[in-house]
Amino acid sequence: MTTWTGRKARLLSIVACACLATTGLAPGDGDGPAVADGCAIAHGGITRGPTSAKRLALVFTGHEFAEGCETILDELARHRARGSFFLTGDFLANPRFEPLVKRIVAEGHYLGPHSDKHLLYCDWGPDRKRLVSRETFDADLSANLAKVARFAPEPPVYFLPPYEHYDAEIARWTSARGMRLVNFTTGTRSNADYTEDDARNFVPSREIFESILRRERDDPHGLNGFLLLLHVGTSPKRTDKFSARFGELLDRLADRGYAFARVDELLAPGEAAGR
């Protein structure tokens, strides 16, 4: 197991958040790492990085399935790009997925937590009624981090919540752990790549692909600072796998001048200008 002593202590000592907040945490509300100026925040979670440079973060989550992960890693390697993988404890403990996790780390991608058991923190109503206690949250995140520690060369400081669903209190609890909560940037259908073929909310890969390029065209900042979320695997009930089009997506975005950064690189202080 890699020792995090020293590195972790330094990271936990950073207390100021320099985000341009739309809602949620203000500077000084927690002990998470400092981030670049110009970030967008919703409910205390960072939802977009600085828009001043043509860089975005490719963010992947994993829990039960991983059939697209090898293709994703192959395409990232082809572009010499680095992604950010947020994996549950169940994923990390699955021996079938261990070679993939080792490859993620060996190829320099970011490895972070996504909850140990993929808990639903809040209901889906407008008031986001919280479904977990502070104790349950802390125990679940600690278990996930312990499994991340088996693979990661350094302690993660960013946390992507399960179901990409949370409230401001969950974000504060994350900050109290010396971490920052991040979530995907809205405006595309990329996060719908898990939907099953016969489901009412099914979104075909063609529509997902087109929605990303349409947002790039229509947003005044393009996809600058985007946290573009996809899944490393989906249920067998979805046969239209977006991973089959992932390489084409990278080709199109690279042709338009975008660079692909890890989430910690995208959000690091001093990175707003792409340094």
Image (cartoon, rainbow, N blue to C red):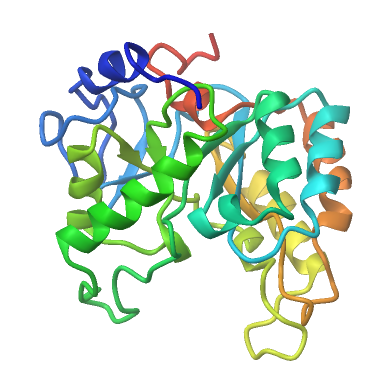
At 82% across and 49% down in the image, what residue appears? 246
At 60% across and 62% down in the image, what residue appears? 191
- The answer to whether one can see residue 47 in this image is no
Relative to 247, 264 lies left or right: left
**Residue 273 higher or lower than 21, as above or below:** above
Q: Nearer the viewer, residue 117 or 221?
A: 117
Q: Nearer the viewer, residue 255 or 177?
A: 177
User: What x and y, as percent, mark residue 28?
Assistant: 11, 29
At 37% across and 71% down in the image, what residue appears? 120
- The answer to whether one can see residue 56 in this image is yes
User: What x and y, as percent, mark residue 180?
Assistant: 32, 37
Asked which quadrant contains residue 122, the reply is bottom left
**Residue 167 higher or lower than 145, as above or below:** below
User: What x and y, as percent, mark residue 72?
Assistant: 79, 45
User: What x and y, as percent, mark residue 172?
Assistant: 18, 47
Total number of numbered labels? 0
Q: Nearer the viewer, residue 112 or 218?
A: 112
At 57% across and 53% down in the image, what residue appears? 93
**Residue 248 higher or lower than 251, as above or below:** below
Name, please, the residue furthest toward the left: 28
Q: Nearer the viewer, residue 119 or 50?
A: 119
